[in-house]
Amino acid sequence: MENVPEMLSKKYWSHFQEAKETFEKAGYIVRQNIYNTATFGVPQERFRVLIIAMKKEFLLPEPMLDPKDFVTVRGAIGHLPSVKAGEIHKEDVFHRSANHRDETLEILKAIPRNGGSRPFGIGPKCLDRVGGFYDVYGRLSWDKPAITITHYARNPASGRFVHPEQNRGLTMREAALLQSFPVGFEFKGTFDSIFKQIGEAVPPKFASAVAVSVFVELLSNVPLDCGGMNNYLNLTQPVSNSFSSVIAGLKRKNYVE
């Protein structure tokens, strides 16, 4: 099971424990942890809870990459041709961004290239009065993973979803590649529904790594006394209710540095 980190926060810990005990009474061993999907080759910082239950001892998936080896935005989408806002690339109908209003384009032109943030005084004045919207109209950085790709990634006003150099939000293809969908993957539906499919998905590379790990564990004969070999990954205490704020702070730090 995959879900948001808040699922293992103090606020919901008792509910999680109740569900866990139900599985344990049925003979399952339950383990859980919070993973950054970037450690599995997904080119974005996406923190998610992973809960696995088996009727045998097993090891949780081990992170595969150190931060220095994370796949960057450049590595994921740097090869794609330039397109203007609203333009559909002739060779890939999914390489298309939203068609922004003139005032939005003027804001984007003022955002420093390659990881820049909205300068004070640029854009809606309400953003200058609220400190919590640091990423709004922000650009992605070429040489870092993207922030969490959501179904709002089509809209620069919803977060750090502006192309590192071009004055537009992300295209469907860019968002898909940052979610680790295969090159050339085809979607069905409207522009908005495709962004929702992309943003709501479990990143395929993460899903694949978890599936392989589970498959290996199902085929292995882990002795009953060896299941704790990587128990350091097993989260046994709730995380702070402010865990999301901590994650946001880490992401902000990564983009400020």
Image: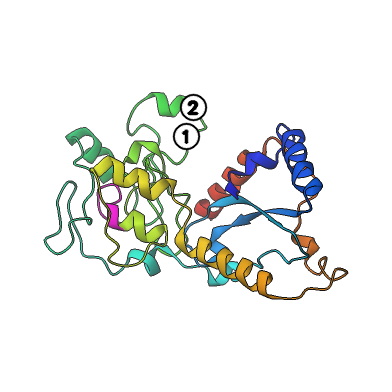
Q: Is residue 236 above or below residue 122?
A: below
- Residue stretch rendered in magenta on the structure: 166-173
Q: Which of the numbered marks, if any, corresponds to residue 133?
A: 1
Q: Does residue 65 appear to the left or right of 203 in the view shown?
A: right
Q: CA distance from mark 2 to mark 1?
A: 7 Å
Quadrant hosting residue 7 = top right
Residue 164 in view (yes/no): no
Residue 17 visible at all? yes
Nearer to me, 51 or 165: 51
Question: Residue 202: x percent and y percent?
Answer: 48, 53
Q: Which mark is residue 130?
A: 2
Question: How many neighbours does mark 2 have within 10 angstroms: few (below 14), some (14-19), or many (20 or more)?
Answer: few
Q: Are marks 2 and 1 in contact (CB under 8 Å)?
A: yes
Give residue 187's quadrant in the image: bottom left
Residue 77: percent from left, percent from top: 33, 64
Placement of 121 over or under 22, stated as above or below? above
Looking at the image, the residue that sits furthest to the left is 90
What residue is rendered at 52% in x and 62% in y? 206
**Magenta span includes 226:** no
Q: How many marks?
A: 2
Residue at 25 percent across and 66 percent down: it is 80
* Three-letter residue code for mark 2: Val
Q: Quadrant of residue 18?
A: top right
Image coordinates of residue 84 in percent, x first then y, are 17, 52
